[in-house]
Every structure is written in structure tokens, then in C-alpha cells.
Amino acid sequence: MNSPTASKVDLSIIVPTLNEAGNIQALYQEIQQALDDVRWQIIFVDDDSSDDTRANIRSRIQTVAFNWCIVSAGVDSHPHA
């Protein structure tokens, strides 16, 4: 149930990130396991990471279907749903 439609989300998870490229995969897996029976979405709020945080988020998202958004605290923002 981890691939909700925008109108059927039971839980929104807001994840602040700053240079967390190495943690995105593990975080996703832990959330998926913990919330297996819940319709959820992730909202990433990135504080202009200088590493590959945003690229890792996008890479993870391309392999699964769920609602997500990257909000940047800086100039570049990439919302998706």
C-alpha cells in the first residue's frame, strides 16, 4: 500500500535533508517496512545539499511509485506528484 494517489494519503512524512545522500535508501526502506499497511507520501525538504542528496532521492523515486516532493530551501525547487 505504499503507492498512494494524491487524494488517498493517510500519512505525509516530512523529511528535512542536508547532505544526506548516503541515507536516502535506508530511510526509504525503513519507512516502507514500518508503514506497509498505510498509504503514505514523502515530502523531502532539502536545504541546498552540496552532495548527491537530490539525485539519490530522484533515483529512488524512479524505481518505486509513490507520491513525493522535493522542496528546496534555496533557489532550485523540484516539486513532483
Image: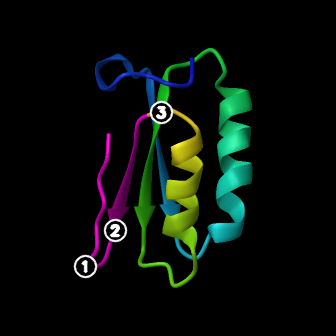
Residue carrying label 2: 72
Q: Is residue 70 above or below residue 6?
A: below
Q: Which residues are magenta?
A: 67-81
**Crowding at mark 1 (Cα within 10 Å: few <14, some 14-19, many 20+):** few
Q: Earlier in the sequence, mark 3 or mark 2?
A: 3
Which residue is at the front of the view, 72 or 78? 78
* Residue 40 horizontal side relative to residue 74, left or right: right
Q: Amino acid at mark 1?
A: Val
* Residue 69 horizontal side relative to residue 51, left or right: left
- Residues under numbered marks 3 and 2 in contact, where contact means CB atoms less than 8 Å apart: no
* Residue 22 horizontal side relative to residue 7, left or right: right
- Residues under numbered marks 2 and 1 in contact, where contact means CB atoms less than 8 Å apart: yes
Mark 2–mark 1 distance (CA, rounded to whole Å): 7 Å
Q: Is residue 30 above or below residue 34?
A: below
Q: Is residue 49 above or below residue 13?
A: below
Residue carrying label 3: 66
Residue 73 lies, in percent from the top left, at 32, 72
Q: Secondary structure at mark 1?
A: loop
Residue carrying label 1: 75
Q: Residue at x 74, y 51 (%)?
A: 26
Residue 3 lies, in percent from the top left, at 50, 25
